[in-house]
Structure formats: C-alpha cells, structure tokens
Amino acid sequence: MIRKIFSLPHDFHILIIDDGSPDGTAAIVKSLAGEYQGRLFIEERKGKLGLGTAYIHGFKWAIAHVYDFIFEMDCDFSHNPEDLTRLYKACADEGADVAIGSRYIRGANVVNWPLGRIIMSYYASVYVRMVTGIKIKDTTAGFKCYKRKVLETIDLDQVRFIGYAFQIEMKFTAWKHGFKIVEVPIVFTDRTEGTSKMSKGIFKEAILGVLEMKWKSFFRKYKKIA
C-alpha cells in the first residue's frame, strides 16, 4: 500500500496509526521511513482504542501539520489507491468540502462481499437517511477526503462514536455545518487477507447511535459555513 500510494502522480504523504498491531506493521513502516523521509509517518498507540479514536488522532495530527487535504482509507486494498486522485480532484478542483468514495451510486461496484453483507450495508445507509435526512447514499463509507477547514470546524473532541457509527457521525456533523459533500463512485473490493472487525456491538452502536445522534442534534447549535 505504501509503495503504491507513493507511485501516484500527486505528492501524497502517509500517516499510519498503529494500535499495537501484532502483525509487525510498525516495524515495516519504520523500515521504510528512511526511504520515504518526510513523506511517511507513524503514530503508535497502546492497545485497541477503536476505529474512531484512531481517525481522530490522525485528523488532529494532520491539522497540526497544516495539511490542506486530509484523507482516510483502509490499508487492505479494499479501497483502491488510484481513487485518491479522484477524491482529491473533487475537493481541490470541483468545489467539494468532503468527497466520499461511494459504493452505492451510479458507476460504483462492490466485489467479493457476500450478498448478506451488501444488503446489510446498503439498507443501513437507507436507515441513516430516513432518520437523519442526510442526502448521502453511502453513509458508512470509510474512504474520504476532507478539506482542512471541515476538520477544524467539527469539534473532534465531541465525536463520541468509536465503531462504524463514527463514519456516520462525521458525515452528519459536516452536513449540519453546511459543508458541501459529494460522492465519487468507486469499486470496493473486499479484503483477501484478515477478518472484518464488524460485530454485534458495533452494529448495535450504529443502529441505536443514529437515533441518539439525531435526537441530540435538536439541542445542539452548528456553526453554518457560508
């Protein structure tokens, strides 16, 4: 993944958040750090602290280092690195504040996922749209590009979800602030190594958490971005 991203025409930098991974990720990244000095970084944390907290850690790091465009993606090639340039173009050239690599719009496709998983994911997004009113087809997508101003506007310390509902909460909050969100069709290919972190607890957080998030939004003020 590291070598593939650095072969792309844009000057991308990579930050890897490692939560004590037992597969040697940190050692591999450190061994490549000299080869990609100033472009490859790693932040190590002790223990499994959750998907959402890892992204928040990364977002804060990117803001502190004054990156204008900040991406999030999986490192198992379920997200095609080639699509980074398309998400970047949507934000840099086409006026989007948040660009989402979407699995559920025209031109997108999902490969190697069991039918049951596709149905669950698709109708989870339908459920989110019904509850929140947000006009996004793929509300749980984890392949995104943010302009820095979006992450500076969102109070990252108030983001409460740590599982897959984190992805929903970030989109919903950006939408409530009035940022322009666009979906870019991608081909999502399920991993061929490792296992999914999806669990009943994470699924429950997403279902009940969306209701809680919507309810609390009635009592929260969102700074509207012109």
Image: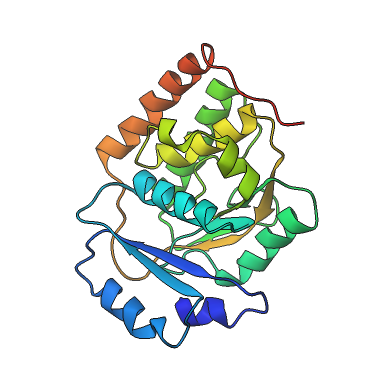
Percent coordinates x, y for residue 89 in the rendering: 74, 61
Residue lying farthest bottom?
A: 35
Visual colour scheme: rainbow
Residue 186, image quadrant: bottom right
- Nearest the viewer among 48 and 157 is 157
Residue 207, image quadrant: top left
Location of residue 129 with respect to 24 vertically, above or below = above
Percent coordinates x, y for residue 214 in the rendering: 50, 19
Residue 168 appears in the picture as rendered: yes
- Nearest the viewer among 35 and 24 is 35
Location of residue 33 with respect to 22 vertically, above or below = below
Location of residue 38 with respect to 96 vertically, above or below = below
In the image: residue 210, left or right of residue 67: left
* Residue at the image point whose x is 26% and y is 57% from the top: 45
Location of residue 206 with respect to 35 vertically, above or below = above
Residue 20, image quadrant: bottom left
Percent coordinates x, y for residue 86 in the rendering: 69, 63
Residue lying farthest right?
A: 94
- Nearest the viewer among 120 and 223 is 223
* Residue at the image point whose x is 47% and y is 14% from the top: 215
Quarter placement of the C terminus: top right
Residue 138 appears in the picture as rendered: no
Residue lying farthest top?
A: 219
* Residue at the image point whose x is 46% and y is 77% from the top: 2
Percent coordinates x, y for residue 151 in the rendering: 56, 43
* Residue at the image point whose x is 66% and y is 56% from the top: 185
- Nearest the viewer among 109 and 163 is 163
Q: How many marks?
A: 0
